[in-house]
Amino acid sequence: MEHTLVNDELWQDFHTVVNMTSRELEDWLRTDAATEDTEALPDQAGSHLGRRVLEILGKRRRDLTPDDASVMRRVVDRVHGRRADDLEPTAGDETWRHGLMRIGHDPLRPVQTPRDRGR
């Protein structure tokens, strides 16, 4: 059995609340950061936390660091703090939705577990 810093529960919770693909999140961070006054570099678009989520999505579980695990817990806590525990699709206002999307969670999308996605 392989030793990892991220237990099964955190791995499952993170990949449940982060319901956007890495491509969708990357595209959203670039779109969200684009304004008339800014022309963010593609690798620097979006919030620091959103970019960290994107990095984590690109890693294998065994390659995660203690900082990655901390970010994963922060994202899970933030999503659950702003949502009902059932995570049913909810409209909410645009600012609220966009804030969640910056960390990879689209509240309009039905939540699937990693098992549902074929992981």
Image: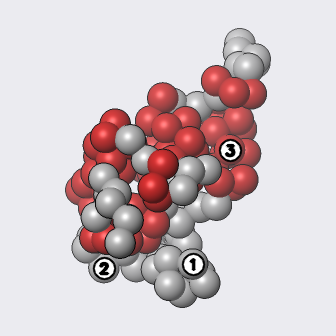
Residue bearing mark 1: 119
Q: Residue furthest top?
A: 37
Name the N-terminal-most of marks 3 and 1. Answer: 3
* Colour scheme shown: secondary structure
Q: Are marks 3 and 1 in contact (CB under 8 Å)?
A: no
* Cα distance in 3D space between marks 3 and 1: 20 Å
Residue 29 in view, yes or no = yes
Please state which of the two labelled residues, at mark 3 or mark 2, is closer to the viewer: 3
Residue bearing mark 3: 26
Kindly state the secondary structure of the residue where label 1 is placed. Answer: loop
Q: Amino acid under label 1?
A: Arg
Image quarter hosting the N terminus: bottom left
Task: Specify the quadrant of the image occupied by residue 41.
Answer: top right
Residue bearing mark 2: 86
For image coordinates 57% across by 45% down, the residue present is 54
Q: Mark on residue 47?
A: none
Please state which of the two labelled residues, at mark 3 or mark 1, is closer to the viewer: 1
